[in-house]
Amino acid sequence: MFKTASRLCLPFALLSLIVGCDGGGGDGGGVRNIGGSTPPPVGQLVTITENNAPTVAGAAAEQVLEDTLIGTLTTTGIPVVRSGSSAAIDLLRLSGSSLAPGMAAATLPTQDCAASGTVDITFEVDSPETISRGDEFGFEFDACNDGAGAVISGGLSMTVLGINGDPNSELIFLQLRVQMSAFSVTQDGVTSGAEGAITIAIDSRQPPVTTITVSSDAFTVTSGGETETVFNLAVTVVENDGVFPTAVSVDTSFRLSAPRIGGDILVATSVSLTSFGEEYPFGGEFTVTGAANGKVTVIALDGDSVRLEVDVNGDGATDVTIDTTWAAIMGEPEPV
């Protein structure tokens, strides 16, 4: 996974692998759809200049490289963002341990969280013995303190869109739709919020390689009083555990609406970003496009350094070249 900082960002390289088995579809309808809010309107593209190019590039890089919200969720025990086979196994346990044989739906009594707060859980499954396409799980958190430093509030629902493989092994394809409504996680005094739906697919059937895809029409995140929305998100992450540290590559495209940079930008990788473990990318590039086809091409020179090729007037030629560091454009301390 790429370097992670404190800003709430999108769940790009969020999972390692998940497992499951091919199942029939549930008929749905028992789990309340917690979403449905209207996303904010698309804004005007930012005018890219020599002066704002590092800031614009940094805003794009934060979205491409970080996964703070979903990374936080991995510590909460919510069975959707867990590594290995545990996500599918946790979903199995959630349904199987709470349903009598033959039952397919339940609204559980309000559950106490590990330290404080509560969570209401509702689910409707095709079979309590396995995970099936169409299974639905809903969570409503009320200041739920997991005992490990995270306090969760708001709604989160999951629907299994596709599944193939053995839910008790490491070889699986699993596709989930995750929807959040007034959802927030507070950790280390920082509250991060999320609103919208994402679709996640994890394919670990060809070890040691795991392929993760993430997509969303619109997903809004808030942290530190700042709100940003990503539109038309498409991400593919390939993780190779056959080497140490894990080799990671990322391809993505999206539109980012960020008031802190004065509007919207279009972002797309032209060469896959590659890194080892949680380091910054040592290879690859992505392009940020603003108004009048102005562009900043962000080129990874190595695990620390990055080059910005700025086309201010949109004629396709580089007007300014800026050599800097990943840490500098992302507002992080330089490595020592």
Image: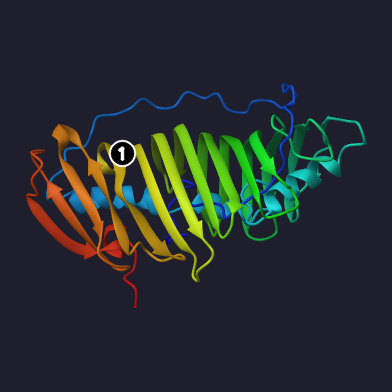
The crowding category of the residue bearing disc 1, from other C-alpha atoms within 10 Å (few below 14, some 14 to 19, many at least 20), is some
Q: Is residue 142 left or right of residue 283?
A: right
Three-letter amino acid code of the residue under disc 1: Pro
Which residue bears the numbered disc 1? 259
Q: Is residue 333 left or right of residue 74?
A: left
The answer to whether any part of residue 145 appears in the image is: no
Q: Is residue 14 left or right of residue 129?
A: left
Rendering coords of residue 36 (x, y %): 55, 23
| The quadrant where residue 31 appears | top right
Q: Is residue 162 left or right of residue 265?
A: right
* Residue drawn at point x = 64 percent, y = 25 percent: 33
* Residue drawn at point x = 84 percent, y = 30 percent: 104
- Choose between 78 and 187: the one closer to the eye: 78
- Choose between 97 and 115: the one closer to the eye: 97
Please name the colour scheme applied to the rendered image: rainbow
* Residue drawn at point x = 15 percent, y = 59 percent: 322
Rendering coords of residue 181 (x, y %): 57, 33
| Mark 1 residue element | helix
| The quadrant where residue 257 appears | top left
User: Which quadrant is home to the C terminus?
Assistant: bottom left
* Residue drawn at point x = 18 percent, y = 43 percent: 295
- Above or below residue 45? Residue 260 is below
Rendering coords of residue 40 (x, y %): 40, 27
Rendering coords of residue 6 (x, y %): 44, 57
- Above or below residue 35? Residue 269 is below
